Each structure stands twice: as structure tokens, then as C-alpha cells.
């Protein structure tokens, strides 16, 4: 009786809400499962349709790109290297006599011309030597004159057989001795005059003087290693630069043909042209440590833009390719198939063409094989392209942003359209 009462209590009208919901789920679980499956399938179907539409729209929508047309032109081929400016002549001005430095006639850093007076040494000691040498000469000339007079008398007496031959011979030797002494005196005079010339130090070249190495009042000597000042010749001036040995074939071919090879010197960033000149010489051996050969170019340097020991970027023109096909370097792509470019066909679709490249210069490169003049190559926007992709060619506006050609033409048409004439 107690168990029956419990069963009636659990199934009777006094059931809780949770118990009722649990009984409901147990009775209709199949319906819930079928409904859930139908909902999931519907969501998947709707999602796939939306993705398909987006994919279809993406395939049909043209990709915006920037493209430029290839052209034929004469293309200059340059060899490049980092060079050092070397003065044509560097002279350490030293004294050729020992004495006191009396004065200098230059300002540090100024330009001087050849034969300009640089400095003066005290000339008084050499003036005294000159006076002594001239006095010695005058005395010896008097001795010679007296000896020649005696020789003439001795010869007359010898003709009269009044004296011995030996006496005449001795007198003749004495005359010759005085002649030699006079020549020595003249040499001493010339030496003293030369020392006086050396007291005036002149510039051996035209160039720029450096910092003074000795001050006036000091005694300078021939053995001084630093000299008085250093002069560097700046006009003309040279640049020494290395090139890889792989470039020797074309370089020597042009050099042996006697071709004048133009050379340009740019600043360290390679943007500002400092001077233009020509190749002067090629070294006679290759540096085995670097695999390069040294070259020397010469520049007029009339505006003094090149300075000794300055580093410059050198561009040496070695050839000119006539009617070469040139494309922007931005159009060159590299991948598993090698070097290629995206070419825009007449129907505004993309085709991929492999390239064989030649020399490059700046933003352009020569194409030996792959594209023809007049074809459009993609320069910007090639990361999403593939064979057959439809594209829309964009052109940069004045602010640098890309604008569609169709929008540009429409805007131009609206700008040129005249307002209607009022009636």
C-alpha cells in the first residue's frame, strides 16, 4: 500500500515543472533531433551560397593595377664602384737651406699659384758667403793677370835664348793653376747665389695649402720631415676606384679600341652629380685579396666639388645598347618559374611572360627576351594576379593616389562639358 501511494504521488497532478519538462523531452526526443539537424543543414546551405556569391563576385571584379608601356630606346651601360679622391700632385714644401724662417706669405687653406712666394729664410749668412767668394775671385784674377804677364816675358827671353825652357814651363803651369782657381771661385759665387735663391721658397704647383707646420722665427733645416706646409693640386684631380675582375673583358675591349670612356662622380648617396671626367688609366694587375682591379679617372674639378680623400660613387660608361627594350624594374617579378612579368593583354586580362634580363640602370632594366615594345607590364598590384585575371588599369593622380582610367575620363568629360545656354 505504501509503494502504490508513492507511485500515485510521483505521477499525479502534484509533479514539479522540472519533472514535467523531463518527461516531455523523453517522449519527444526524436522530434528535437530531427529539428536540430534540419536547422544545421539550413545554416550550412545558406552560408555556402553566400560564400559562393562572394567568390563569384571576387572572380568577376577586375583587380586594380598600375601598368606602364615598354619602349625602345638607347640604353647606356655603366660600371659602378666606390672611389677615393686623390690629388694629382701632393707636395711637401721643405727648405733647401738651413736658417731662420723669417716670414710666411700664405694663409692656411688658401689657393696658391705656381711660382708664388711661400716663405723666406734669413739670407744674410749667404750674402756674406757671396761677398767672400767674390773677393776671392778678384784676388785670384789679379794673380792670374800677373802670372800671364810674366809668362809673356819668359817666352820673349826664351826666344832670345836668355832663359831655360824649364822656367817657361813652370810659369805656364802657374798660369793654368790660377785659371783653375778662378773657376773654383766662380763656382763658389754661383753656390752662394743659389743659396740666396733658396732663401725665397716658391710654390712648385698650383693648389691649396694646408696647415702651417712651422712658425716664423724658428730655425728650419733640410732634414725636417714635416717641411713648412703641404700643397695639394686640386685642378685637375683624380679618383681611384676598384671594379670586379668580371668587368675586365668589356672594359679592356673599349680601352684598347681607344674609346674615351666618360666617368661621373656622385656623392656618397649616389644622387648628386659632383663632377664629370674620363678614364685615365687601368692598373696592371688584379688584387688577389679582393678580386678587383683599380682604375683612375681624371676630372677638371673647376668648381672644387671634389676634395682630397673624399669618398665618391663612380659611374663609368662602357657601352650604349641601341634600340633596347626597356621596362621598369618594378615590373620584374621573381618566382619558381624564374624571372617574369605580368603583361596586360588587349582584353584587359593578365598573361605571364618569362624574361631574360640585361643590364639595369636606376629604375629601368633592359629585357633581352620575353616582352616586346608597346606591351603593358604591371608595376603595382601584382601580388594577387595570375594567368587570366581581369584587371583595371589605374593611373596616379597629382597627389600620388591611383585613380581608375574610366573615372579619370568621366571626370575629364564632365569638366569639359559646357553648361546649357539659357533661353
Image (cartoon, rainbow, N blue to C red):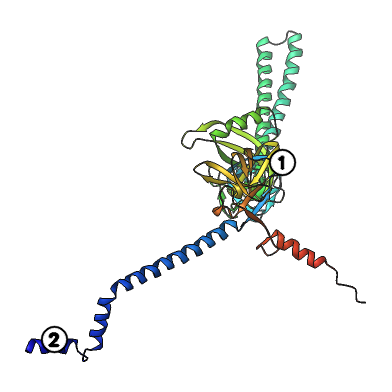
- Quick one: SS at disc 2? helix
Query: Which image quadrant for residue 163?
Result: top right
- Quick one: SS at disc 1? strand
Q: Is residue 382 above or below residue 148?
A: below
Q: How many marks?
A: 2
In the foreground, 110 or 125: 110
Could you tell me residue 384's position as x and y percent?
A: 55, 54
Q: Is residue 332 above or below residue 184?
A: below
> Alpha-carbon neighbours of circle 2 within 10 Å: few (<14), some, or many (≥20)?
few
Mark whose residue sits in front, 2 or 1: 2
Could you tell me residue 296's position as x and y percent?
A: 61, 38
Question: Could you tell me which quadrant the C terminus lies in?
Answer: bottom right
Q: Which residue is mark 2?
A: 7
In the foreground, 394 or 357: 394
Could you tell me residue 330's position as x and y percent?
A: 60, 50
Residue at x 74%, y 12% (from the top left corner): 157
Q: Is residue 123 visible?
A: no
Instruction: Of the two numbered discs 2 and 1 on the same chain, state the one appearing first in sequence.
Output: 2
| Numbered mark located on residue 72 in the image | 1
| Residue, far left | 1
Q: Is residue 325 left or right of residue 1?
A: right
Could you tell me residue 421's position as x and y percent?
A: 90, 73
> Alpha-carbon neighbours of circle 1 within 10 Å: few (<14), some, or many (≥20)?
some
Query: Which image quadrant for residue 161?
Result: top right
Residue at x 79%, y 64% (from the top left corner): 413
Residue at x 57%, y 60% (from the top left corner): 57
Amino acid at each position: 500500500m505504501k509503494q502504490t501511494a508513492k507511485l500515485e504521488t510521483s505521477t499525479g497532478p502534484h509533479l514539479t515543472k522540472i519533472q514535467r519538462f523531463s518527461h516531455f523531452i523523453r517522449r519527444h526526443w526524436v522530434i528535437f533531433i530531427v529539428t536540430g539537424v534540419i536547422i544545421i543543414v539550413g545554416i550550412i546551405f545558406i552560408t555556402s551560397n553566400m560564400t559562393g556569391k562572394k567568390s563569384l563576385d571576387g572572380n568577376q571584379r577586375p583587380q586594380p593595377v598600375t601598368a606602364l608601356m615598354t619602349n625602345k630606346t638607347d640604353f647606356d651601360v655603366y660600371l659602378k664602384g666606390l672611389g677615393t679622391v686623390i690629388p694629382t700632385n701632393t707636395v711637401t714644401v721643405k727648405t733647401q737651406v738651413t736658417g731662420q724662417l723669417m716670414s710666411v706669405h700664405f694663409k692656411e687653406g688658401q689657393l696658391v699659384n705656381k711660382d708664388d712666394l711661400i716663405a723666406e729664410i734669413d739670407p744674410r749668412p749667404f750674402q756674406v758667403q757671396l761677398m767672400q767668394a767674390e773677393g776671392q775671385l778678384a784676388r785670384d784674377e789679379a794673380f792670374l793677370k800677373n802670372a800671364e804677364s810674366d809668362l809673356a816675358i819668359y817666352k820673349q827671353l826664351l826666344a832670345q835664348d836668355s832663359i831655360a825652357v824649364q822656367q817657361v814651363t813652370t810659369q805656364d803651369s802657374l798660369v793654368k793653376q790660377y785659371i783653375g782657381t778662378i773657376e773654383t771661385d766662380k763656382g763658389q759665387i754661383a753656390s752662394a747665389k743659389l743659396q740666396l735663391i733658396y732663401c725665397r721658397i716658391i710654390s712648385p704647383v698650383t693648389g691649396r695649402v694646408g696647415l702651417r707646420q712651422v712658425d716664423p722665427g724658428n730655425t728650419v733645416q733640410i732634414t725636417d720631415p714635416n717641411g713648412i706646409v703641404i700643397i695639394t693640386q686640386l685642378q685637375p684631380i683624380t679618383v681611384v676606384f676598384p671594379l670586379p675582375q668580371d668587368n675586365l673583358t668589356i672594359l679592356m675591349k673599349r680601352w684598347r679600341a681607344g674609346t674615351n670612356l666618360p666617368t661621373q662622380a656622385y656623392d656618397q648617396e649616389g644622387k648628386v652629380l659632383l663632377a664629370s671626367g674620363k678614364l685615365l688609366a687601368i692598373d696592371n694587375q688584379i688584387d688577389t685579396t679582393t678580386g678587383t682591379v683599380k682604375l683612375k679617372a681624371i676630372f677638371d674639378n673647376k668648381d672644387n666639388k671634389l676634395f682630397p680623400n673624399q669618398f665618391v660613387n663612380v659611374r663609368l660608361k662602357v657601352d650604349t645598347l641601341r634600340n633596347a627594350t626597356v621596362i621598369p624594374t618594378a615590373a620584374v617579378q621573381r618566382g619558381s618559374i624564374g624571372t617574369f612579368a605580368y603583361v596586360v593583354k588587349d582584353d584587359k586580362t593578365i598573361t605571364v611572360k618569362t624574361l631574360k634580363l640585361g643590364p639595369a640602370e636606376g629604375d629601368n632594366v633592359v629585357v633581352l627576351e620575353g616582352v616586346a615594345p608597346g606591351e603593358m607590364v604591371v608595376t603595382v598590384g601584382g601580388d594577387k594576379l595570375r594567368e587570366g585575371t581581369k584587371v583595371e588599369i589605374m593611373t596616379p593622380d597629382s597627389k600620388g593616389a591611383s585613380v581608375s582610367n574610366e573615372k579619370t575620363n568621366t571626370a575629364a568629360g564632365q569638366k569639359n562639358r559646357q553648361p546649357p545656354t539659357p533661353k
